Image: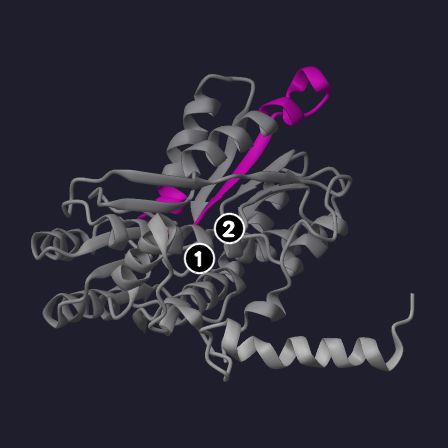
Amino acid sequence: MKYGGFGKLIALGALSLLPFLSSAPAVAEDNVYLSDRTFPGPSGELWKSSIDALRGKKVTYVVHVTGFPLFDAWTKTIKRESELYGINLSIQDGNWNPDVMNQAIAGAITDGTNLLIIHNADRNVFAKNIKAAQAAGIYVIQLNMNSTVNTDAFVGADYFGIGVTMANDIVKDCSPSNGKSGKIAIVQGSTTASASFDQYVAAKQVFSEHPEIQIVSDQSTGPMWSSENAKQIVSAALIQHPDLCAVYGMWDQMDVGSAAAIQESGLKDVTLYTSGGGDGEMCNLVKQGVFGKYYAYNAVRQGYDIMSVVKTLLINKPEVGKSRIALYSPIEVLTKDTVKNWSCFDPASVKLN
């Protein structure tokens, strides 16, 4: 039905009444969470108290390094959410140096931050300062790698779960009963990082229950998780054991080197198993069959999980050191046959400005 000019007059008349019918300001707000708005009733009270509990709080985020999709996915999400809710965020990039990270943690304690997010590069190095932070009344969330000290919360991959799941898959896929050699190589990352340490403990537990599986190579790539070292380790294993069935790797970026060694060997029956944060470049390697099985936890989703815990602690205000929250990221096992375009995130979307 067409209303013509009369309909337009009615519409214009209705719009002209809006300033009188609404208390909203004439100029749109950039961010409602930074406004002084209030709303009626219990819902309005809940909204206001939650927003007020976050605004102006100091959060210090100490990350091992930036410049990799995994770390940048966390960083960009944490930064976005903090800006949205008026949280004063300080980002401290350790640039692979645990001493720099320890200094950043100590500085945050001195500055009186309300909450620390720590990406533990080492299980032992930060334990003293983590205890000091909690003694000073600062909430501590450990991100993706735990220390020897439990804190208010851990958010990240379940490396025990990954270790057991990956090892069980290798046992099944490489069993001599299935016509395979049973020979495998393990490529560890930094042995003092829980991402490597916990996986190793869990995987070795499974392999110890299966004597048909022979670990013919078991080495670490060092504290930098070097892809070049991974390549050298796997190359040597393949020369000595051309009937190798599988390579158990512990981080996708590191295992790009493991994959290169397998490809250069020309051996077609060696399968690479690895895990990581699920960026698109790694999914492309799965699609190409370079990664045989990829155990992906979504780093972008982890970033939002981290901030959910940050908000929970700052709003609810439990006694520091009394909570034991563990939010483990779900794992998706991706193969050439199961990977989809939406299985991984676009690394370009998380690049830091």
Q: Which amino acid is tagged 2?
A: Trp
Q: Residue at x 53, y 79 (%)?
A: 19
Using the numbered discs, state the Cα–Cα distance from disc 1 to disc 2 in whole angstroms.
8 Å
Q: Which residues are magenta?
A: 171-197
Q: Pointer 1: residues within 10 angstroms few (<14), some, or many (20+)?
A: many
Instruction: Give the labeled residue for mark 1.
Output: 225
List x then y, in percent, for residue 250: 49, 46
Q: Quadrant of residue 199?
A: top left
* 230 vs 52, nearest the viewer: 52
**Circle 2 Cα neighbour tier, 10 Å, few/some/many (<14 / 14–19 / ≥20):** many
Q: Are marks 1 and 2 in contact (CB under 8 Å)?
A: yes
Q: Residue at coordinates 13% horizontally, 52% vertically from top-left? A: 134
Give the residue pinned by disc 2: 251
Residue at position x 25%, y 38% from top? 324
Side of 150 where 82 appears, left or right: right
- Nearer the observer, 261 or 85: 85
Depth check: give the residue in front, 275 or 7: 7
Colour theme: one colour
Residue 36 tag number: none
Above or below: residue 55 compared with residue 274 = below
Callout 1 amino acid = Trp
Count the marks.
2
Q: Residue at x 13, y 72 (%)?
A: 111
* Residue 244 picture location, percent across and down: 64, 35
* Mark sitting earlier along the chain (1/2): 1
91 inside magenta stretch: no
Answer with left or right where residue 10 lies relative to residue 125: right
Question: Is 130 placed above or below 188 here?
Answer: below
Q: Is residue 206 left or right of residue 130?
A: right
The answer to which image quadrant residue 201 occupies is top left
Q: Position of residue 83 (x, y in %)?
A: 39, 72
